Amino acid sequence: MSNWKLICKLEDIPQLGSRVVRRATGGDIAVFRNAEDEVFALHDKCPHKGGPLSQGIVHGKRVTCPLHGWNIGLEDGQAVAPDVGSCSNFKVKVEGGEVFLSV
Amino acid sequence: MSKPRLVLIGNGMAGVRTVEELLKIKPDHYDITIFGAEPHPNYNRILLSPVLAGEMTISEIVLNELDWYKQNKITLHTGKQVTKIDRIKRKVIADDGTEESYDRLLIATGSTPFMLPIPGNDLPGVIGYRDIKDTDEMIETARVHKHAVVIGGGLLGLEAANGLKLRGMDVTVVHLGPWLLERQLDEVAGRMLQKSLEDKGLKFLLQKQTEMLVQGESGRVAAVRFKDGMTIPADLVVMAAGIRPNYTLAEKSGIYCNRGIVVNDTMQTYDPKVYAVGECVTHRGIAYGLVAPLFEQAKVAANHLAGYGIGRYTGSVTSTKLKVTGIDLFSAGDYMGGDGTEEILLNDPHGGVYKKLVIRDNKLVGGVMYGDTADGPWYFQLLKDGRDIHDIRDSLIFGQSLVGDVGHAGNSKAASMADSAEVCGCNGITKGVIVQAIKAKGLFTLDEVKKHTKAASSCGSCAGLVEQILASTIGGAYTPAASDKKPMCGCTEHSHDKVRKLIRDEHLTTKETVFAELGWTTPNGCDKCRPAINYYLISTWPHEAKDDPQSRFINERSHANIQKDGTYSVVPRMWGGLTTPAELRAIADAAEKYKVPTVKVTGGQRIDLLGIKKEDLPGIWADLNAAGMVSGHAYGKSIRTVKTCVGAEHCRFGTQLAMSMGVKLEKMLFDMYAPHKVKLAVSGCPRNCAEAGIKDVGVIGVDSGYELYVGGNGGIKTEVAQFLCKVKSDEEVMEYSGAFLQLYRLEGWYLERTCHWLERVGLDYVKSKIVEDEEGRKALYAALLDALKDAKDPWATSREPEAIKQFIPIVVEA
């Protein structure tokens, strides 16, 4: 069972940028948009030292954590080698120019 | 449609490196097949010496495990020697009958040891020194026999001799030349080396010509006889009298060879479908017997095999380091000197240190170091860069002097450090960990070491030390690229220099055109190149190129400094370090209103409010703006602060109005972005209370005007600023320092502080542009003022409707 929530318009997220989604239950989610207008959602916490991934630089299908430069794959939340670690990812989709998140 | 087929003959370092480079830039382009004559996967041949010496094992020097071949879908034929290339049918045939057809062929057959053409050279117990089999045989022989003779006192011979000695043999090195390593060392250094090796128990016979090898009763070699009649016992004879490029196969197939397979600058042979790399080739008449050049060759060959057609190999300057534990020896370039060269010498026989630098036309062209090789990589870099050394000539022989660097307990000599010594103070990485990673993972470049160990990847102050460790661990395989040729990042082959020039010459104004023009391998760069390119675009084409916030590091995107817990720090500007009761009251009010946990005074005479949530930033900025304060840019690669002393306004010693001068400079430079952060200071007299000697631009008031100093640094590397010139008026201070900073903004590479930029280009160059060229100086100054003419406070513009979005989290109901 999926529980899609409308979070914003696609244009509210800058290309190669992100927005933070705050949950009442705590634990921010970072929603990213790449150059091809695909969106991705990850727990906003780097597996290394908990840096806010939403504040990183987005390139290709990766984001670079602003604290110590780990690269995290946007699709699977896995750290790019040689670093090892993973962060949870969430389902997200774009329909009619609007972004929906499954929480 | 099936893929084109690439066949590689030679499963060694050069060939496999080329395949690796190819897979990096164009994976899945070819069906790849590799033939190797040895029954092993690709291993690090240069580490055979440590294996012989018992310091490493064979399994530790394997570079590509069998899994690697599998993962990359490469067909590997080990233990099969290719005996024929049929260029008409485009196929290769191995000794066991295996046939593979090709569309492109890469030959990397390496070299073979030169066996002296003397009687007895084929006796059992007589070997060359080239591969795992030879190494195993030496180790085996050392177990049961006593006397070893190594013919040839070159690098390989000495490493073999050292290893055999450590394995318990009685070793004599026979050498035809007048001193050891005469191709790498001058006579003085050669004699010093011989002395230290003799102290380790090796014996030497110099200028001896071998006549024949004598067979013993067992059928095995038993003795070596010389032309002068002398005979010495030998149960093992290692021929290390040189190597010969292995090009028989190519020559037999009709490919043009001349003491090696002849290739052009794209590593292509006379047959356009056939490429060749490594020790088997002759390029511009030179066959390289060291592994270092193969890395450059591999890159070029891979690029052309991938069909990109970018890049030429134009030859290599090589350096040498002997891998014998406890002996420090380094040589590079033209170390012998001669007509048209000058030499700088340091000779301390008692201290065991000898250094010789060879200079031609004010440039370093070669050098030899013995005993103290700490600065070898630095000299080698100067040599490759072709930097004019005129302005550092008087201290050149003493080396780079890393004493100003912090974070590694003053250590500057990698070879003498203990394995437990901390090299990278930021990440707590010891020398032992770095050496282990270099060996186990087969790392060859500083970037690889950074990636795998994290050493030198934070503040970077230990990069020089890490490079030294790299050089002393892999010896001659270590080769830094010329500074202006180092790729910006993994997305491109192009250097900062090249990208800057192209943006200027081709009038590029967007990152997309840069990526397209220069063939970026990633769709939109990475966190390394995007900020650099964004800076190059906006600094080269102010008012025209549009700033791209998503290409900026978070601090510059949110105009505050991110902290370890994800909160931010806010520093309001205090021009020249001056403030007022009203400003202080506003800061205190804001601190209370937003519950700022920490309020701190900074080293640049500002007040720092730490621990602010991102969503509170627009609010606190609005409050500070209302009190007349603007962004302090404490977060940017930009003008940070102008620190001042109280100056002649109050001080009884003051000669100039330091505070007012500082305020004027800071207002002029407001919102100025640069390759890295920029700090200034103005002192009112030579007592220099504002510490102008460690600032990017330091201004010191004297009775008759101001002295200007540039390129100082008080951070990672303590660097005293250098005297630029003396000026008379406040206007001149603005003009000269403005022009200096504009030159740095236009020519510095991203993340290069003024001190590093100055080290690269030299103070003489900067003086010629700023002090000696009045017209040029005025033009630079005008360009700076023009670039900054419509500077706005980012704290105000960030609160505009589109820009403020990033600060507002989206809230979802549960």
Image (cartoon, rainbow, N blue to C red):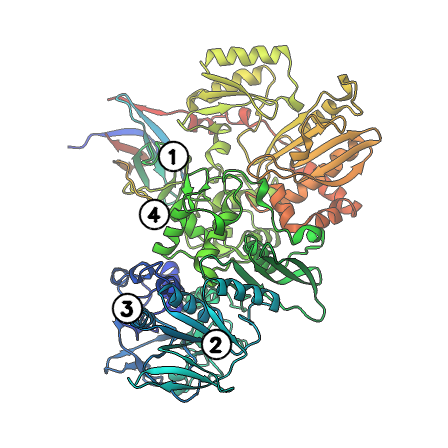
Question: Judging from the image, what secondary structure is the residue with disc 1 in?
Answer: strand
Q: What type is the residue that disc 2 sits on?
A: Val
Q: Which residue is mark 4?
A: A82
Left or right of B85 on screen, residue B783: right
Q: Could you say which disc has been placed on residue B40 in the image?
A: 3
Q: Which residue is mark 2?
A: B174
Structural distance between the alpha carbons of marks 1 and 4: 25 Å
- Is label 4 on the same chain as label 3? no
Q: What type is the residue that disc 3 sits on?
A: His
Query: Of callouts 1 and 4, which one flags the residue occurring earlier in the amino acid sequence?
Result: 1
Front-lying residue, B711 or B301: B711
Q: What type is the residue that disc 4 sits on?
A: Pro
Residue B110 in sight in this render = no
Q: Which residue is mark 1?
A: A18
- Is label 2 on the same chain as label 3? yes
Tell which subunit mark 3 falls on: B
For residue B485, above or below residue B462 = below
Residue at the spot 28% in from the left edge and 68% down from the top edge:
B40
- Res B301 quadrant in image: bottom left
